[in-house]
């Protein structure tokens, strides 16, 4: 679990740096994908899925 959380932090920092420097390309797409997969394997996956479901349901009710 500790390794997964540190990977999420590392990928998140690299992705933040790439977005702020506006150097987007294939490398940053790979970092974004790896950040998503790493985040999905942490405890944050449940709340993120619930939030996404709530947003989709709210949009559907408009």
Image: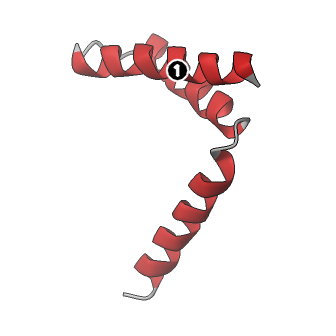
Q: Residues within 10 Å of mark 1 (few under 14, many from 20)?
A: some
Rendered view: 26 above or below 50: above
Q: Position of residue 60 (x, y in %)?
A: 46, 82
| Camera-side residue of 47 and 23 | 47
The N terminus: image quadrant? top right
Q: Which residue sits furthest front?
A: 2
In the displayed structure image, the side of residue 41 where residue 48 appears, left or right? left
| Camera-side residue of 24 and 45 | 45
Task: Specify the quadrant of the image occupied by residue 61.
Answer: bottom left
In the displayed structure image, the side of residue 42 where residue 51 appears, left or right? left
What residue is rendered at 64% in x and 24% in y?
A: 5
What residue is rendered at 52% in x and 72% in y?
A: 54
Task: Specify the quadrant of the image occupied by residue 19.
Answer: top left
The colouring scheme, among rainbow, by chain, secondary structure or one colour, is secondary structure
Q: Position of residue 16 (x, y in %)?
A: 35, 21
In the displayed structure image, the side of residue 9 where residue 7 appears, left or right? right
Rendered view: 15 above or below 46: above
Residue bearing mark 1:
9
| Camera-side residue of 10 and 27 | 10
What residue is rendered at 61% in x and 17% in y?
A: 6
Rendered view: 38 above or below 28: below
Count of residue discs: 1
Q: Position of residue 13 (x, y in %)?
A: 42, 17
Q: Which residue sits furthest left?
A: 21
Q: Position of residue 20 (x, y in %)?
A: 23, 20
The C terminus: image quadrant? bottom left
């Amino acid at each position: 679990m500790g390794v997964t959380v540190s990977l999420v932090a590392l990928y998140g920092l690299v992705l933040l740096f790439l977005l702020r420097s506006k150097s987007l390309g294939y490398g940053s797409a790979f970092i974004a994908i790896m950040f998503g997969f790493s985040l999905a394997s942490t405890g944050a996956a449940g709340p993120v899925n619930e939030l996404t479901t709530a947003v989709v349901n709210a949009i559907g009710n408009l």
